Structure formats: structure tokens, C-alpha cells
Amino acid sequence: MVIGGGLAGMVTAAALRHRFDEVVLLERDKLPTGAEVRRGVPQARHAHLLVSGGARVVDSLVPGFLNRMLAEGAHRVNAPGDLVTMVVGWMPRRAGSQFLLSSSRALLDWVLRDMVSRDPRVQIRAESPAVELIGDAKRVRGVRGPDGVLEADLVVDTAGRGSRTPKWLAELGVGKVRTEVIDSGLAYATRVFLAPEAARTRFPVVNVQANSRIPEPGRGGVLLPMENGRWIVTLAGTRGGEPPATVDGYTDFAMNRIRHPILGELIARAEPLTGVHGTRTTSNQRHRYDELDLPEGLVALGDSVSAFNPVYGHGMSISAHCAFVLRAVLADGGSTRQAQRAIFRIGAGPWGMATGMDMHFPNVRGVQPGPLDRLRRAYSDRMGLTAVSRPRVYDAMTATYMLAKPMASLMAPGVLLDVLRGPIDPPLAEPPLTTDERRRAGL
Ligand SMILES: Cc1cc2nc3c(=O)[nH]c(=O)nc-3n(C[C@H](O)[C@H](O)[C@H](O)COP(=O)(O)OP(=O)(O)OC[C@H]3O[C@@H](n4cnc5c(N)ncnc54)[C@H](O)[C@@H]3O)c2cc1C
């Protein structure tokens, strides 16, 4: 039994269908029969990219997923070759072995749902909220849905940030789960554009990262190419530096408030297709189920366990890795408690990456950086500068960011040595768009 039909729910159903006779997925929402934003996944209005480490796992759980996405118009963006990105400074472009899948979140959800629902072992029940766990403190035996009790050998909670498992566990007499929240107060403002005609089929991702090295709110933004010749442009600012969710405020922020006006210049030549949508559902939040004596028969994964500051673009990929590891632990005869601890470990590295950056922004809530955190940040800054001219460092940074390699590879001896040697050249002074890309974008 899977609670929640977002991305985590779909990849979980896909992962478990070979292990159980039947997988029933309960989704609270009415589900659209196409690529549409729906109430239960409001974040779909904002930029969503799937990093290659996650995309490959989704493709292994749902074979053919990547090809279908590309056929539907998603962009496969080479990383770092097709990334125009400002980290400490502008990074050079060089073809690499990683990639980003860039599309609307609505398309991604629709393709996954459509592919998973074709398997007769998976039953997706829309407009079917789970309202209670059935069982006791030792074992969960099912859930209560709209039509009464549904028994199950295994219940997986993938109900997202709003999951009610902490409350349901308390009702079963299991202890209170400890919840960690680290909140930089980040706000998003997003608008969708029709790209200039010559830039519709192929265009790089353009990313201006916030600078956490100065004692000011972080401000940044990203442009992602999507299906149907559209660009989605999300602007973001931490507490005190939030982008306004008005057309004038958004345009001014893109042009004047972030570290480089490139996003403002690009959208000035594109045709707006939507108004500006805002969100503040961005804190890093994790429930420490791994510390509890959880009842057997229950696992939580996806945002219902660990939700991350979305600016790092990791949530969907981590969900896929967790579904994969859940299947592996069960296949090895492991218990659901062991699976829950493995799920925690998968999120731990990306949690460290996200919170390790966020804690340095002013007025962050939930943590204050200590000397070790400042040392880590200094290493990370030096790594960003060194990566400009030392490919081994840039490759390691890219692969870990894409969740294709563990965070520990940033400390591999060769990488460490290069970082200690430091940069050879300074970052580029201007965004490395090619002459052809500039022409196609009308710059
Ligand atoms: C603004 C924003 C931008 C993001 N950008 C990225 C990005 O670029 N890349 C990335 O990898 N990740 C990104 N994320 C994170 C990503 O959206 C999530 O990690 C991902 O959606 C996985 O979430 P989920 O399936 O666990 O939960 P959700 O997507 O929230 O889905 C939960 C589902 O459960 C359903 N549900 C809830 N309660 C019940 C119930 N009681 N019974 C039945 N159904 C229920 C909901 O209706 C919903 O369908 C972003 C998040 C935000 C907020």
C-alpha cells in the first residue's frame, strides 16, 4: 500500500511491483489525464530538474522513462557542457558525462504516472485519501481509506511534506518523532515564457547561484528549457531578500537584484505565458524515523521523511534512490526498520550539502554555523574556484551534485590535492553563452 501519488509514490509503486502480488496506491487528489499541475503538488508551478544520478535510477525502475520524456519534449542538458552557471564566478563549459532532465514537473509526473499505471500489478486509486494507520505500536497492518480498512503487508508513506505519519504514529502509541528544520526563509517566484523562436528547440540551463559568502540575503535564479519551446524561470531569495511575486517586482529582481542581469536580459526577449507564482515551502525538514522503534510493516520515503531546500534540485532524485534501496533491503530479507535507516542514510549527504550552504545566510532558523562549518564552507569555496581550471575537481563537483557519486568523492585524494593547489585561472567574467546562443536568444 502506497500513500500518495506524487513522484515518490510512483517510483515506490514501480520498485515494489515485482515483489508483491499487488501494489495499491492511494492518492487524495483527482488525477489529471495529462501534464497538468494539480492541488496536491503545487510545487509543479516552479522549476524542476531531475539530476542524472536520479534520472538513471528512475529509468531503471521504470524502463523507457528517459526515452519517453525526450519524445515528449523534455531536454537532456549535458552537465557541465550545457550549463551556463555562476557558482563563485562563471564556470567554463566542457562536455561531461552527467546530465539534467529539464521539463515541466507536470510532464514528468504525467509520464511516470502513465507508465506505472499500465502495469496490471499497480492499482492507482485517485480521490482516495488515507486517513489513519491500522495496527499497533509493533506492526502496521494497513490504512483506513475512504471505503474503510485496507489491509496490506507493507505500507509506504509518500504523502510529501504534509505527511500525517508523525500524528498517526503517536495515535498508535509509538514515541514522538524528532523533527529537524533548517530554514533560510527562501522564497521562490516563477514565471513561464515562450522562448524566442530560434531558442526553442535547444538552449542551455542558465543559473545564477546565490552568494552565501557575503553577509546579505542570498539572491539567485535559474532558467530551464522545457517542452513546447518554453522556458521556466525561477527567481529565489532567502529571508530579507525574497523576490516579489508581482510582474514588475519579478522583472526588476531578475535584472537588478541578482549577481548578474543575464536572466533579466533573456526574459526581456521572451513572451510571458503566465503570471508570477510564489512559494515559501522551501525549508530543509526531516523526521528522524531512523531513531524510533518504528512498527514493522511501515516505511516512509520522499518528502514525507526528508524535504530539502529545492534550490539544490535533489528531492525527486533522492526519492528515486530511496525507492531503489527499499526494494534492495526487502529483497535481501531486511526489515522495514533497516530499510528506514537506509533511507535516512541516502538523504544524509544531500541534507549536509543543502544545510551546509543554507546555514551561512543571514537570519537562518534552526542552526548557527560553528568553526567546523566555516572550515567546510572555506573548502567548498576554494573547490568552486579551483574547479574553474582543474577538470578533475569540476568533474567531482558535478558528479556529486548530480547524485551520481557520493559526497565523499569531494574529498578523494586527487581532488583534495587539486583543491589544496588551488585555481590556475580565475572564473570567467561573463556568462559563457556561445555567439550562436546569444543570437538565437536575441541578445
Ligand atoms: C518549489 C519547489 C521546487 C522543487 N524543485 C525541485 C527540483 O528542481 N528537483 C528535484 O529533484 N526536486 C525538487 N523539489 C522537490 C520535489 O518536488 C519533491 O522532492 C518531490 O515531489 C517528491 O515528493 P513526494 O512525492 O515525496 O511528495 P509530493 O510531490 O508532495 O507528493 C505527495 C502526494 O501525496 C498526496 N497525499 C498527501 N496526503 C495524502 C493522503 N493522506 N492520502 C493520499 N494521498 C495523499 C498528495 O496529493 C501528493 O500527490 C522541489 C520542491 C519545491 C517545493
Image (cartoon, grey):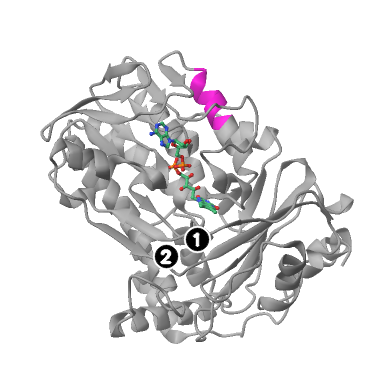
The front one of 159 and 369 is 159
Q: Percent x, y for residue 336?
A: 20, 36
What is the magenta segment's predominant secondary structure?
A: helix
Q: Residue at x 41, y 74 (%)?
A: 364
Residue 398 image label: none
Mark 1 C-beta to ligand 1 under 8 Å: yes
Q: Quadrant location of the N terminus? A: top left
392 in relation to 137, above or below: below
Q: Is residue 115 magenta?
A: yes
According to the image, label 2 marks what residue? Answer: 354
Residue wearing tag 1: 312
Q: Is residue 314 above or below residue 321?
A: below
Considering only vertical position in the picture, is 300 above or below 94?
above
Q: Amino acid at mark 1?
A: Tyr
Write the residue at 47% across / 54% down: 314
Among the two numbered marks 2 and 1 on one chain, the one whose residue lies closer to the N terminus:
1
Question: Over which residues does the magenta segment extend?
Answer: 111-118
- The count of marks equals 2
Asked whether 297 or 323 is in front, the reply is 297
**Quadrant in the rendering for residue 416:** bottom left
Task: Answer with left or right where residue 262 lies relative to residue 384.
Answer: right
- Disc 2 to disc 1: CB gap under 8 Å: yes
Q: How far apart, in angstroms, are the residues tagged by discs 2 and 1?
A: 7 Å
x then y, percent, for residue 295: 15, 36
Of the 4 image quadrants, the one containing the C terminus is bottom right
The answer to whether residue 418 shows anywhere in this view is no
